[in-house]
Amino acid sequence: MVLPALCVNIQLSSGQVLINQIIKKTMKKKFLYNALIILALTACTEQDIIEQPSTPNGGTEVRLPADVNSGELLIKFKPEMTDILDRTMTRATGSGGAMTRSGIPSTDEVLEILGGYHFERIFPIDSKNEERTRIAGLHLWYQVKFDEDTDLQEAAKRLSALGEISKVQGNQRIKRAYDVKNRRSYISQSALQQRAATRSGVPAGRFSDPGLPYQWHYINSGQNAFDKQNNAGEIIAGSSAGCDTGCYEAWQKCTGDPSVIVAVLDDGVMYTHPDLADNIWVNEGEELRAGTDADGNGYKDDKYGYNFVTNTANISWTDVEDIGHGTHVSGTIAAMNNGEGVCGIAGGDGTKNSGVKIMICQVFSGNNSVSLNGEAKAIKYAADNGAVILQCSWGYNSAEANEVEGYTPGPATEKEWADTYPLEKEILDYFINNAGWRHRRVCIGQRICGSLRFSGSLLQMRHRKCGCRRLYAFFLYQLRYGSRCMCPGRRYGVL
């Protein structure tokens, strides 16, 4: 029987390599030919005829960081493969099994050689947002896992040579750029009140939270309790008045807005904390541990957000290795300005439901963290569920990262970053273009005024009108008053 050429794509140049590798696994050469015939017949029967034959790309060199995960890669297919991939996923879903192959014979041939056992679309189907997901091409990104002993560079080269694949990227775990062994000191509410009573000379503005006098980075009068004095009471190492984020001026205009949702990509956030509880984003209709996806966004039970480390809605903050950073930064953003604890930059005016909302996107849990595909899922989740700000303060490896301290040097230019991490580039573009879709009046500098820029180790936004650059951690004041550009020198409510 002669098989149609479009159903089988086995080239003589790679035939010997294919035979050698499979024979080692089967130990009987005759099994090879049987397996190939069965594979080809199955492909033709279940998929009819593949509309697009595989045209080799020539084996584009894929840049893989030194700390890349072994035995896995992230790949993006060309749009022409959409129907085949959809049909394969539909069959796998209908049978209740997990995907291990793409349904594209040329791709599956390589996966067989590599010992592939896992094939999964990175972004789950969200019925409300699937159309724009496909417009952005994010539905074409897949994670593949295979034998960990496989040469990863060779695997990337084989996959990138296939005509149906447009991009190949390594996958690696994100790391904190600070020492997790340094623990913060916590003091009691009574101690805060006692210290606040002895504090003078500070324009506390509208709020009386006992921790505010020690939040010099909000309002710095130049007279702080931590200023070093000699025995005569003279200040010998003081602080500079006005060296702060300008909260006093910002609070005259805005103290927060509950329509602004800030996605905190960090440790788990203690959503029961008395100074945060009223400013936590709640996904109405979802219930913890219900085991259902009530809103159909692809994530079960995500009432307060999602734990992308464990792939569950169980937000955690009690692991022995947790350092509380997620709760800490959430307090900086949205601790309620209610006369207790500390102040948040946008925690509201003291009345209920007046501060910004914290959406929890957990990407660290104790010593564990997500890989880049998990980071991408968290960013997309944030955009699709109404967030307009990303908080990503774990750091980013620059080209000068110190290998002695355990960090792998990162990209030195924007192009190098985009070439090395195309998924990260695409998902950040997706966030810029889609964040805040549920609250159209909330904008990022006139809603979508910026474009992503990479400079050294910093992700930045370039304003289209004035050209100024600002860090990719967005500005609350700019969000609230989006018709004005936050050029350097205007220090209103910087997050």
Image (cartoon, rainbow, N blue to C red):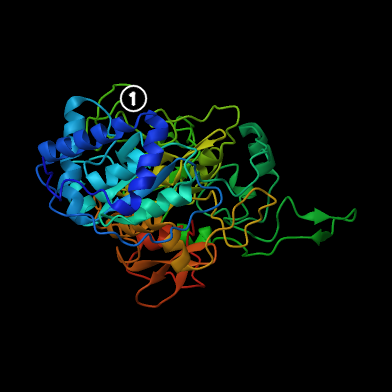
Q: x, y (%) of residue 245?
A: 55, 60
Q: In this view, does 272 lie above or below 371?
A: above
Q: Which of 166 and 196 is in front in this view?
A: 166
Seen at 49% across and 54% down, the residue is: 64
**Residue under numbered circle 1:** 288
- Label 1 packing within 10 angstroms: few (<14), some (14-19), many (20+): some
Which of the pair 353/42 is nearer the observer? 42
Which quadrant of the structure image shows residue 291? top left
Could you tell me residue 57's position as x and y percent?
31, 61
Q: In this view, does 20 lie to the left or right of 283?
A: right
Furthest toward the top, the residue is 290
Image quadrant holding the N terminus, namely: top left
Q: Is residue 388 left or right of residue 228?
A: left
Q: Which residue is drawn at 18% across and 26% down?
A: 95
Left or right of 52? Residue 197 is: right
Write the residue at 56% across / 36% down. 324
- In what element is the residue under mark 1? loop
Q: Is residue 87 visible?
A: yes
Q: Is residue 146 above or below residue 55?
A: above
Q: Can residue 312 be seen in this view?
A: no
- In this view, the residue farthest toward the bottom is 466
**Looking at the rendering, which quadrant does residue 362 occupy?**
top left
**Kind of residue indicated by mark 1:** Leu
Across and down, in percent, residue 435 comes to 30, 54
Give whichever of 482, 31 is nearer the camera: 31
- 222 left or right, relative to 291: right
Q: Where is residue 10 in the image (x, y as percent from the top left)?
A: 26, 48
